Image (tube, grey):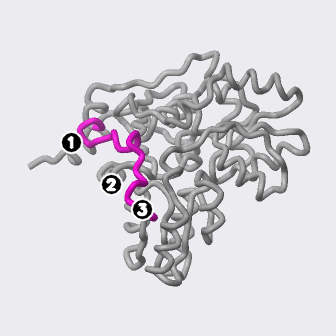
Amino acid sequence: METLQDRIRALKQRRNAVILAHNYQPDEIQAVADFTGDSLELARMCARNNADVVVFCGVWFMAETAAILNPGKTVLIPDPSAGCPMADMITGEQLRALRAEHPGAKVVCYVNSTAEVKAGSDICCTSSNAQAVVRSMGDVPVIFVPDRHLGSYTAEMLGKPLILWPGFCPTHQRLALPEIEALRTAHPGATVMVHPECPKPVRDAADLVLSTGQMCRHAKTSPQRTFIVGTEQGILYRLRAENPDKAFHPVNDRLLCPNMKKTSLEKVLWSLEDLQHRVTVDPAIAVRARRAIEAMLAVT
């Protein structure tokens, strides 16, 4: 009997399509994806793939980035309602007002943002390259939007004050220090890895502060056998698949992004069948946003 996965693979070949999935996507989506990664890895893959159709299994701002980097391709998102609360915490108008308050400052924009906000920025960054990007700005004042936690971590690591916008990720905001302490007691000697979107007390309690891609690479190369993972639980699929002889424990059971979980196999199939839902960006916005994204890729 033909399965949903079989139908997706057959349609993907017929459409000359590639399926990209973020590390936070449901297990079954990661299983059918051609490539799974973090924001930086997916941005690079978007820029160099040869497919006619890109099915982006993630949230809206990620699919927007794929469309900006691939103006000649058909970029689809299986569920267009999959948004990002952090991205919605700043608008283009608010960014313009912030720039007016700080003349001469450069804007570093986390990729977890809308195309309009990227277009109003000098350069983008991801959680894995934020320090390199800010360092590339030199000695000028830097505005960092929209995540205050990634911004404050970057400022700490570089010893450079940044002008921070008060945005945050609601999922990573759910991590609490007592939970990490309890897991350390339950799993003595385990390595605690957390995402830089976490609040400072959680970051300070961790052994490592890493992007999701960095977590995956570290887990593969580390001799450590047990890890406590402080980020969205979707990453556990990849960590366990790539390291079957190691143990990974989430900090808590609440680390679920509801928007990342909106993608299903049925929606991926329908996306390929009907070439829906196509992601488009206003050309005037896209050209400026692309400049900021490509500036980031050039740095890293």
Q: Are marks 2 and 1 in contact (CB under 8 Å)?
A: no
Q: Give the camera-side residue of 186 and 248.
A: 186
Residue type pointed to by label 1? Arg
- What residue is shown with label 2? 27
Indicate which label's residue lies in the foreground, 3 or 2. 3
Residue 79 shown in magenta: no
Label 3: which residue?
A: 252
Above or below: residue 38 compared with residue 142: below
- Earlier-in-chain disc, 3 versus 2: 2
Q: Residue at x 48, y 34 (%)?
A: 63
Residue 18 in view, yes or no = no
Residue that appears at 35% across and 32% down:
79
What range of the chain is rendered magenta?
251-268
- Asked whether the beta carbons under mark 3 and mark 2 sit within 8 Å of each other, the answer is no
Whether residue 5 is visible here, answered yes or no, is: yes
Above or below, 102 against 223 in this view is above
The residues bearing labels 2 and 1 have C-alpha atoms spaced at a distance of: 18 Å
Where is residue 72 shown, x and y percent of the image?
51, 25
Check if mark 3's residue and mark 1's residue have beta carbons within 8 Å: no
| SS assignment at label 3 | loop
Residue at (42, 38) in percent of width and height:
56
Please state which amino acid type lies under the numbered disc 3: Asn
**Which residue is nearer to you in this view: 49 or 32?**
32
Against 247, residue 294 (above or below) is above
Residue 7 numbered tag: 1
Measure how far apart labels 3 and 2 are at the Cα level: 18 Å
For residue 144, above or below residue 212:
above
